[in-house]
Amino acid sequence: MKRAWKWIIGIILFVVVVLVCLTWYYGRNWQPIVETRLKEVVHNATGGLYTLKYDRLDLNIALGNATLHHAELIPDSAVYQKMILEKIAPNNRYHIKIDALKVRRFSLKDALSDKKLNIKTIIFEKPEIHLMSEYHTFNDTIAEKPPETLYESIKDIFTSVNVKDVRIDDVAFKYSKIEEGKSSDIDLDRVNIHVHDVLVDEASVSDTTRLFYTKMVEVRIPAFEYELPDGFYTAKFKDLLINTRDQNVLFTKVEYAPKMNKASFYKRKKQNVTMAVLKFDTLRFEQLDFRRFIEEQQTIAAKVQIKNGAVDLYQDKRYPKKTANKIGHSPHQQLMQLKKLLRIDTLFVDNISVGYHEFSAKYQKEGSITFDHAQGTLTNLTNDTLALQQDKYMRADLSAKIMDAGKLHVQFEFDMLSKEGFHTYRGTLGSMKATPFNRILRPLLNVEIAEGHIDKIAFNMEANDYKNWGEFRFDYKDLKINLLNKPVQGEEKKAKKLVSFLINELLINNGNPDAKGVYTVAKVNYTRVPEHSFFKTLWQSLLDGIKQCAGISPEREARLMGAADTAKETVKGAKKVVKDTGRFFKNIFKKKDKKE
């Protein structure tokens, strides 16, 4: 027994000695071979575009470990220019620096006997990645010969390469977009990338469960901020999480806003353009086709969610507005004009507030109208003409609290293939007080609703580039308005009240049905002003319905809109108040024709 143990221990010691000797031999004699072949593979696989440099290669065959110290992958600009002339240059180039590239637990036996390279982990330490993107039109054409796959580049060395995990932490990433010789840059710090199960073999290139040979790529980008080239806006987010296995993209704390305040924005613009501020807690893409997005810059997703945020639009009428024909520029028409394909099955809106704010040049005040806590869906959001052949309508079903008071529910249908931009919209507004609308009426029109109650609004409209038409119902009661001007005293104040009283009694129906029980249903047939935007045209169409239901004819509207200014002159002299007021209203209500 004792003799047997001696043999066993002797054999084990012999094996250990042999392994140590083999490790020492391969470490000394294979290292130069590995270094030569490694650089050769990089050069040949990239058509000479890249060169691999490094300070030292540590190779431990016994443990299956290798470490490249201070490695650098360098693109050759001369080779790239030559590839451009030959029309074979890729759009993207990379310059990569790494403090250390660690390869852990690879099998030398499999690599030698079966030409299969299996690696457990690859770790990049302190990597710096510079991606240079330069668009070439020849890459849009179909090549006569398909490009060589990664497998075809390595098949003479290995029949398969499998890496279980690749970790790239705290990457310093720089993206440079080169156009006409000029470069615009985006810098990102502390990017973390985890790649799981990379397999390069004859079958993996066509494996639909893999994205570019990988089972999963997970990316986290923190604290991103980018100043747009226009010099006015910045875009930023707190975190971006990407997972190709789950097909999800998640942005948190997204913001698109001017980098200066409103006053500075318009002072620099010197025009009454729309200033936009967008802020969202969550922007999520689900079931995103990463392959189509990366290869063709096409955005195809099953679901997109925008949650908890606000959209605020501002205009300042103290500055001149550049007039332009807006025909053909409605939202659905602009979507169809996108150069890249977009197809989103459903866009979910969850708790988003939308506000429109306008500064009046006439009254030097800002008025606002808000749609609070908006939620709903947009479906068939696409410019894909093939998909639209099956269903040509993009639909929106949205609800919100207008002025944080009345419940508004609106449904849109957009004919995406209509040459004249045909669309429909219908909706309802529930019971609410009328006075919240003073937030926009006082600053912009210098009038206010003293009292009034909206029972219900309902509309059913059709529209195209040139007209909006349909039926509008407005049920309300006890409507009273006040004309506003500077504070006045004594008989002047009484005269202003008299003006408001006569307007309420003679120009506007204080309810629908009116005092005689007559109920008015508006028949809207509004002709679009070509310079008006889609949303302004929509509002003007609904306003036409409101005016009809309130009994305001075009003639009465002209007199009403001039009343606030004319009343200011009417109340100037205390002794002439009654006389002037009488003359004022005699002019307003004199008979023009038999129809009014």
Image: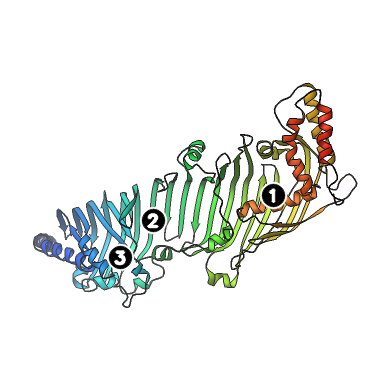
Circle 3 SS class: loop
Q: Which amino acid does label 3 sit on?
A: Pro
Instruction: Give the CA distance from mark 1 to mark 3.
Output: 52 Å
Tell me which corner region of the image, top left, top right, bottom left or bottom right, holds residue 22.
bottom left
**Looking at the picture, does residue 438 appear above or below residue 383?**
above
Tell me which corner region of the image, top left, top right, bottom left or bottom right, holds residue 324.
bottom right
User: Where is residue 29 drawn, in percent x and y?
Assistant: 9, 63
- For mark 1, what is the residue? 408
- The mark that comes first in sequence, 1 or 3, is 3
Q: Which mark is in front, 2 or 1? A: 1
Q: Which amino acid does label 1 sit on?
A: Leu
Q: Of the numbered discs in the image, which one, if any, rests on residue 191?
A: none
Q: How crowded is mark 2: few (under 14 residues within 10 Å), some or many (20 or more)?
A: some
The residue under the point 56% across, 45% down is 313
- For mark 3, what is the residue? 90
Q: Which mark is in front, 1 or 3? A: 3
Marker count (numbered) = 3
User: Where is residue 421 drawn, in percent x and y?
Assistant: 61, 63
Residue 340 in view of the camera: yes
Q: Which of 164 and 461 is in front in this view?
A: 461
In the picture provided, is 27 more to the left or to the right than 41? left
Q: Which of 394 and 519 is in front in this view?
A: 519
In the picture provided, is 570 more to the left or to the right than 222? right
